[in-house]
């Protein structure tokens, strides 16, 4: 005589799977910013903000580097803590990457003056 659970258990599992609600849809992906286009815009931002000078410091000392980033912006978008507050000394590739991350997240909002000329 066959064991009743040997047949019933797989059958119940199959019915349970068929009656389960489908998984929720995946959230939509964030807007795609093409790196080439973003880098073109950021090159314009760098020229506008500092004439392309990675070591630039604003008169107030608050904005630093090629993209004239605040310390908060620099840290929020991936800058190395060792350069925080003196991020004009960060390697150019790091400044570029932080600016790109910020641009992908916020567009030109951090650079209101450049919005008019770098779109």
Image: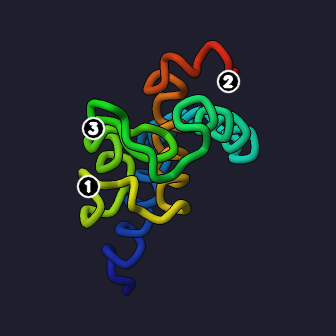
Viewer-nearest of discs 3 and 2: 3
In the figure, residue 70 lies in which quadrant?
Answer: top left
Of 108 and 2, which appears nearest the observer? 108
Q: Which mark is residue 118?
A: 2
Viewer-nearest of discs 1 and 3: 3
Where is residue 113? Give x, y as percent: 52, 17
Where is residue 99? Give x, y as percent: 50, 44
- According to the picture, the residue beneath numbered tag 3 turns out to be 61
Q: Earlier in the sequence, mark 3 or mark 2?
A: 3
Q: Please, which residue is most extreme toward the front here?
A: 59
Where is residue 15? Give x, y as percent: 44, 52
Of 49 and 116, which appears nearest the observer? 49
Name which residue lies at 30% across and 61% down. Answer: 83
Number of numbered discs visible in the structure rendering: 3
Element under disc 1: loop
In the figure, residue 59 lies in which quadrant?
Answer: top left
Q: Please, which residue is most extreme toward the top here?
A: 116
- Label 2 to label 1: alpha-carbon separation: 26 Å
Q: Earlier in the sequence, mark 2 or mark 1?
A: 1
Element under disc 2: loop
Q: Which mark is residue 101?
A: none
Let me know if residue 58 appears in the view: yes
Of 56 and 68, which appears nearest the observer? 56
Q: Which mark is residue 84?
A: 1
């Amino acid at each position: 005589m066959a064991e009743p659970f040997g047949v019933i258990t797989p059958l119940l599992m199959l019915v349970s799977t068929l009656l389960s609600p489908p998984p929720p849809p995946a959230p939509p992906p964030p807007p795609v910013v093409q790196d080439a286009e973003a880098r073109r815009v950021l090159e314009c931002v760098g020229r506008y903000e500092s004439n392309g000078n990675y070591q630039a410091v604003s008169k107030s000392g608050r904005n630093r580097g090629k993209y004239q980033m605040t310390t908060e912006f620099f840290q929020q978008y991936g800058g190395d803590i060792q350069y925080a507050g003196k991020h004009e000394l960060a390697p150019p590739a790091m400044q570029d990457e932080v600016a790109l991350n910020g641009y992908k997240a916020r567009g030109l909002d951090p650079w209101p003056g450049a919005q008019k000329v770098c779109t």
